[in-house]
Amino acid sequence: MEQLRQEKPYLKTLKEAAVQPFIMEERRVTRTALISVEGNHYSVPFRYARGKVRFRRYENHLELLDDNRVTDTINLQYGKRQRIIRDEHYPEHQKVRQKPSNPLQAEFEALAPEAKDYLQGLSQSRVGKLREQMQNIIELSENYSKEAMSRAMQRAIQYGAYGYGKLKNILAIQGKAPGSLPECPNGEEALSSDLDVDVPNRDLTYYEEGVL
């Protein structure tokens, strides 16, 4: 106690830490400009698409970095399997709109130059629930290049073949035999019998969406 009495005049209250604790992390960015953090997907500026992004991760938010400069701040959300998308991360989409639009629509229209026209046809086709169709096609696009998505959507628009299942089939055929999809003026696909394409055995549920 005597020692404490002697030292007490020199003791000072500790100040709160000026800098919050954080962890430096890096993530690969999808082609539609999303990163995955703790089971949720967050959009980042589209210039990072198909690249990597570094960020400081705090308890409730992320700070995206360009070298050591903070370029954007993203608030973290509780829960799992959420898609937190900000419309301003898709500048090409913003150019054609005077006010913010549906973020999912912005992500979809970034898939290919034809995506806007394809989405219009998809909405009119009434194939399943539109939101689910859009999300499924966005996830499907992660396995294909933007050029492949563009060709497939062109084909689908040409023949009015809208829907996740039909677009998936077009992409699969393009991948097996690029450039060999036949012309069909009546709008019905009839593959040539001399195409050398291996046809995998699939469960019947694979075809529930319909084929071309």
Image (cartoon, rainbow, N blue to C red):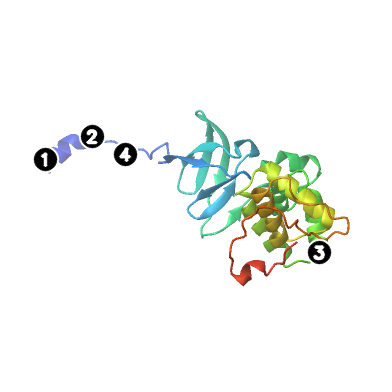
Q: Is residue 167 above or below residue 19?
A: below
Label 1, secondary structure: give it.
Answer: helix
Tell me which amino acid carries mark 1: Glu
Give the x, y percent position of residue 173: 68, 53
Tell me which amino acid carries mark 4: Thr
Q: Quadrant of the N terminus?
A: top left
Q: Indicate left or right for 210 with 16 as reference.
A: right
Q: Indicate left or right for 106 with 17 as reference.
A: right
The residue wearing badge 4 is 13
Which numbered disc, 2 or 4, marks the residue closer to the eye? 4
Label 2, secondary structure: give it.
Answer: helix
**Upstream in the sequence, badge 4 or badge 1?**
1
The residue wearing badge 1 is 2
Label 3, secondary structure: give it.
Answer: helix
The numbered mark at residue 9 is 2
**Upstream in the sequence, badge 4 or badge 3?**
4
Tell me the distance, in whole angstroms, between the alpha carbons under discs 4 and 3.
68 Å
Residue at x 52% of width, y 60% of height: 80
Residue at x 56% of width, y 52% of height: 41
Tell me which amino acid carries mark 2: Pro
The residue wearing badge 3 is 125
**Upstream in the sequence, badge 3 or badge 1?**
1
Q: Quadrant of the C terminus?
A: bottom right
